[in-house]
Image (tube, helix red, strand yellow):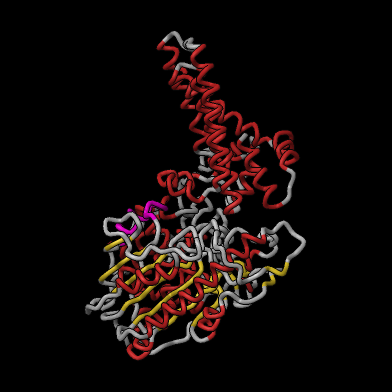
Amino acid sequence: MIQLGIYLAEYMGYGQTPTANLLAFINNTSAAGINVLFMMLIMWFITIVSNRLPVTLILTTVLSLVWSVAEYQVIVDRQEAITEASLQEVTAIGSLLKMIDTKVQVFAFVLIVLTISFLFVIYRRSRWSVFKSIRFRSLALIINILLLVPFLEVNSDSYSTSSQKLGNSPKLWDSLFDASSNGGILAVLNSRTTDAMVEPKNYNEKAIKNLVIKYKKQASAINQTRQNSNFKKQTVIYTLSESLTKPSYVPGLTISDDPLSNIGSIMDNTSSGHMVSSGYGGGTAGIEYSTLTGFNITAYKPTITMPYSQMSSSINKKATVMGQFDSKIVLHPYVGSFYNRRAVYNNMGVNYFYTTDSKVPIRYQRSVDSGSYISDESAYKNVLSKISKKNNSQFIQLLTMQNHTPWTFKGRDYNMIEPTNSNADENTIESYLQGLHYTDEATQTFLDKLNDLSRPITLVWYGDHWPGIFNFVNTTTDALSAHSTPYFMWQNDAAKKANGTVNVSANYADPSDFTAMMMKMNGMKVDAYWALKTDMLEKVPTINNYTRDDKGKLTFLDQRGNKIDEKSLTKEQREIVNDFKLVQYDITTGKSYLLKTNFFQKVK
């Protein structure tokens, strides 16, 4: 049942036959047996605890139905399957349901009600106990738990080899591929978090101390060429534009006019380029994590897909861009329960997280053209209302929602011309294009108002990932295009006057480099950490964010988009990359030696 939901979703997106895929999975894949065996153990666990077989039938049937529908919806929307990290989103179930198509909700509800009703009748007519002996029942529970342990640790060093011999072939870089080939249950088990990151070579306290000395010297060298010490009396704004990419980045798409003409003009006149996203159709918080921390998701094991949820305890305000500012604000025109953001922002030292459900909610909440979410125009108004008039340094992050799925804009000012012979949803694409137009107009107005302010303002603006609607694009052969979104870094006239300006354009940029780019643009001095990130920016090719490796190897892109293997880097480049891995490992997985040093410090 679970696998059928996966293959039906694949059929909707890629035209594959779900029945054929399901039969092939059952007949030819040893992993199918592992999925069945795990489900049997779960059913026996429920039976032992409840001592009623009908209870087991009710719970497992309903669970399978819900799981199947959830897999279907996640795959259709994001082209990714359910993972352990996805399950943590269940705390925001109310908000998640709003994103699901109404017909799917009704179908799932009716199916579940009918199933529960039917099995309840069976339960009422059959109340016999499975176990009569408490001792035998206790023994059965212990054996059951012992048998479950290897399944819960299939990706650990202790059990990974055995599970692979039984037929598990993890595809951790692609959850949908993993679920399709290994089964939905095993895909979740494969994604479970063990060690977040492969230990870099030479990781020890002495190596970390030497690294601190090295990059403090590098910071001193960099700072000799920079005139500005801090962002006092200034504001830096990071804006994540939800599900936004330029139509010109989409291979095979021809439209009647450009809905992002203003943003195109802005990009032509300031530092800009393609951001290489780690997500497709989703993964917002992962990209956000990279921009704020400077850490790169692809340096982690493939099981790490949502660092906010999986690694929240390792996030420290010192090791973020926010550590350079007096006042830190985040605005999100939606609920604040997603991605464990409240806990994460607390760790980052955020002073206030404004949402629709915060104690003091965001003020402007209008949508546009019957859109499903608060408009970008309203979101920008909320930012303008929070810009400080004090002498402090201020950081503001805006996470927009206007262009999040589903797209329900009524206007059709931009028409899809090509492709004509595909299963592309023309209505959805044209609605999405309309939303881009509203973002384009609102962004230009926003910049005009920022430029009228006497307070120096720097804006880092980027689309986080593609929407999952261009199903005529082959995301394997056109992977770079499918993971490219626009970014730009802009200063108002006051910031240019106060700081000067440096062009930091990169045709392909890694979001984890944004802060180093922003500080270089403003001529700001750096601490040892941002000196390391500056070396990564200036001396190492762009990290390829959509390729994962379970051995911790990175791949890179040159400015033409050509892939470069880590072993092909120069000796100096490999040393810098290893230093970067040492820092990321120490803070997130290792012993946090760096937090006992002055490696991270607010530049004064």
Q: Quadrant of residue 428?
A: bottom right
* Along the viewing direction, whichever of 14 and 119 lies nearer the viewer: 119
Residue 589, given in percent of the width and then of the height, sits at 40, 54
Q: Is residue 202 left or right of residue 60?
A: left
Relative to 180, residue 413 above or below: below
Residue 30 percent location from the top left of the image:
68, 35
Vertical comparison of 603 with 105: above or below: below
Classified by dominant secondary structure, the portion drawn in magenta counts as helix
Residue at (28% x, 66% y) in the render: 597
Residue 95, position as x, y percentages in the image? 44, 49
Query: Is 66 contained in the magenta span?
Result: no
Which span is picked out in magenta? Answer: 335-348
Q: How many marks?
A: 0
Q: Is residue 570 visible?
A: no
Tell me which residue sits at (27%, 59%) in the image.
360
Direction from residue 346 to residue 183 in the image, left or right:
right
Using the rendered view, name the quadrant where residue 31 is placed.
top right
Quadrant of res 433:
bottom right
Compared with residue 282, is residue 90 higher up or lower down, i.e. above or below?
above
Residue 455 visible in this rendered orientation of the protein: yes
Closest to the observer, 187 or 124: 124
Point out the image quarter for the C terminus.
bottom left
